[in-house]
Image (spheres, coloured by chain):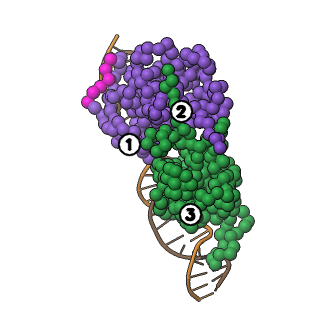
Chain colours: A purple, B green, C orange, D brown
Amino acid sequence: MKLYTPPAVTVDTVIFTIEDGQLKVLLIKRADQPFKGSWALPGGFLLRNETSEQGALRILKEKAGVRNVYAEQLYTFDSLGRDPRGHVLTVAYFALVPRDKIGFEGSGDLQTPAFHPVKKLPAVAFDHKNIISYAVKRLQAKLGYTNVVFSLLPKYFTLNQLQSAYEIILDKKLDKRNFRKKFLSLGLMRSTRKMLSGTPQRPAKLYQFITTKPTELKKFF
Amino acid sequence: MKLYTPPAVTVDTVIFTIEDGQLKVLLIKRADQPFKGSWALPGGFLLRNETSEQGALRILKEKAGVRNVYAEQLYTFDSLGRDPRGHVLTVAYFALVPRDKIGFEGSGDLQTPAFHPVKKLPAVAFDHKNIISYAVKRLQAKLGYTNVVFSLLPKYFTLNQLQSAYEIILDKKLDKRNFRKKFLSLGLMRSTRKMLSGTPQRPAKLYQFITTKPTELKKFF
DNA sequence: CCAAAAGTGTTGACTGTACACCCATGT
DNA sequence: ACATGGGTGTACAGTCAACACTTTTGG
């Protein structure tokens, strides 16, 4: 009785960043069939004895040139129709990367990675549209009870940059005074003596996160 | 370049119920190596062209004799050391089943399924202890913003049964008046004209859920 | 009439939300 | 001096948490 034929196992990584006031996802042009030439999430088959998490980190390094960024498992997608080649199970991850940490060049391949605003995606291969929208929902939820937002900000940041990150991801305006009050009361950040200069306005105080480890908090949004 | 050797793919299902005032998980005695004879989550290899979700539902039918119960994907576990046979990826699901719906007998095998209190588990095979504790955390969190609790209760139930389910799962006492006030204000249930009789006390009003579809709500615990 | 669980409101503390003006700088 | 974003406080409403006694039934 040999009922077992394993599905193929891939990993796909939804890499988020904030750029030009928008939440964006990294997509690559597929080099091979199926869906050759269309945009897709960076990903691929697991290597021998590679875990899905290691695979996701490898993708992050190869395609985005980053290490030590926030990444977590998102969901496993394995519906039968999702890949024309047959039964392919993919473990999806999502990652948060500050825009300036990203180096496309390292990969050397021609898969032309590029960031696309999540609100204006091109056609994407497989079920990647689902995966991305699932990732967006997860990210929005996580903003409300974790400190993950620090993964998208530079080491020193202003309260307005912080608020702006929330507004971009949640896709709604927030009240400035209430936002500051709430966030400062959480004790997650400390203000530094630095100021943001180079702007044509009053310089803003720079803050930094006290802990740069992902932490779960009581709901705060 | 043949770098790809797929991991084996299994599904494991954490089946919760409430019995004797405790949260319990269904475990079976393993019939085969590895870990032959020790307790484990019901699960196994996916059949040909079977999705993990179909596999989880199959397990629910075969091992617990239930259909149409609440089930959702939990997480995918694939660390290299988790199975002595090699690289085995498992997609874990969790399910909520009212105790009286469960029929062990259907399976006909000798894997002696039995419910074990999550607070007093025996030694279990593989990394199943991790999987169970991850599932408990997820379940506790879900109570706070969904109506999933209905999946553990009979069609008609008293407010005390409902509160008791929350207390058992969250493992803490709740204030009776506040609980009733909050829950009734959610508009999830309607009171019926029935009463719970057969007890040696004052009969309790019976309620039923208005919707028996899993619904996401604004946080309420 | 007694035991046991069912049922019921009020208060004070806290949290969330709405809202408008002055400040510091670069040009 | 002016344009631009930076920074600040109060008041009201809504929600949360603590708390104890009366009611209804079966035995």
Same chain, marks 3 and 1? Answer: no
In the image, residue A166 sits, relative to residue A64, either above or below, namely below
Residue under the image location 52 percent in, 26 percent down: A44
Q: Secondary structure at mark 2?
A: loop
Q: Which mark is residue B6?
A: 2
Residue at (56%, 61%) from the top-left corner?
Answer: B115
Q: Is residue A33 left or right of residue D19?
A: right
Residue A133 sits inside the magenta stretch: no
Q: Is residue B221 visible?
A: no
Instruction: Give the percent coordinates (x, y) of residue B74.
Output: 55, 44
Marks 2 and 3: CB-CB under 8 Å? Answer: no
State the image quarter where residue B154 is shown: bottom right
From the viewer's side, name the closer residue of B164 and C15.
B164
Numbered mark located on residue B164 in the image? 3
Residue located farthest toward the right when viewing the structure as drawn: B193
Foreground disc of the pair 2, 3: 2
Q: Residue at x 51, y 24 (%)?
A: B2
Task: Say which amino acid is labelled 3.
Answer: Ser
Q: Are marks 2 and 3 on the same chain?
A: yes
Q: Which residue position holds label 1?
A: A186
- Crowding around mark 3 (Cα neighbors within 10 Å: few <14, some 14 to 19, many 20+) is many
In the rendered structure, the answer to whether residue A120 lies left or right of residue C24 reads right
